[in-house]
Image (spheres, rainbow, N blue to C red):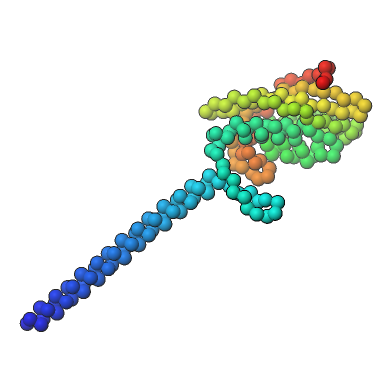
Amino acid sequence: MKDKITSYKNIYSVLKINRFIVLAVVAACLLTCIFSMLTVFRFNRSMLNSTFAVNTDGSIIPLKLVSQKENMEVEALSHLDLFHQYFYGIDESNYEKNLEKALWLGDSTVDNVYRQKKADGVYNRLLQYSLVQKVISVNTELTLTSKTTSFRTEVIFEINRGSIVDRYQLITTGNLIPVDRNFPNNTHGLLIANFFENSLRKLHNQQ
């Protein structure tokens, strides 16, 4: 009888040890999973705030990004400068390529202005007389609110007609709306909306 009690005690001891081992393994697995999830979460957040560029020699360069809200003004000014350079800095050799790039940066209102210019024969005259339209400066005033970003841009450009060079001042207005970034067509993730050419005048006192 004593031997049976001793055997039972041994079995209970083994079961207790097995139970402790199982609980310890489960607890270790849970801690490992939690640690892994936290590590992946932190890595993911770090990646969202970083991007990479390819150097000319093929190496990867990490670039730190600031938040879009803090960088909005810089991106908007760069976007508008790029658009006006493409849309108005044209000649017979690059106008198709430049206009295609410009149209990626605006919505249908930009396309409407392009179509109107095309219907008015602006680009035909560019080809016929080998005109060179060169942008001298792009100065933009931004109005940023919590809902919209509007702009007023002054573009100074020259039209070279060979021996004659005329300079003009153009005022454009519109809004900017955020869209998905499209590399390389729309790197700033902004789209020009409600685009309008307000005024165009010839500058007589050229410097």
| Residue 20: x %, y % from top left | 24, 67
**Residue sitting at 35 percent across and 62 percent down?**
29
> What is the residue that sits farthest to the left in this orientation?
1
Q: Quadrant of residue 113?
A: top right
Quadrant where the N terminus lies?
A: bottom left
The C terminus appears in which quarter of the rendering?
A: top right
Left or right of 66? Residue 23 is: left
Say if 24 sits above or below 121 in the image.
Answer: below
The residue shown at (45%, 54%) is 40
16 or 123: nearer the eye? 16
Q: Position of residue 141 (x, y in %)?
A: 64, 24
Q: Is residue 166 above or below residue 82?
A: above
The location of residue 7, given as percent across then percent down, is 14, 79
Q: Does residue 132 appear left or right of residue 172 in this picture?
A: right
Q: Residue furthest right?
A: 163
Residue 136 occupies quadrant: top right
Total count of labels: 0
Asked whether the viewer can see residue 154, the reply is: yes
Residue 5 image point, x, y percent: 10, 78
Q: Residue at x 59, y 24 (%)?
A: 143
Res 119 seen here: no
Foreground residue among 132 and 193: 132
Using residue 158 as the reference point, say whether residue 154 is left or right of it. Answer: left
Q: Is residue 164 above or below residue 79?
A: above
Query: Which is nearer the eye, 189 or 139?
Result: 139
x 35%, y 58%: residue: 31
Give the quarter of the image for residue 102. top right
Residue 178, above or below 24: above
Task: Answer left or right for 85 relative to 175.
Answer: right
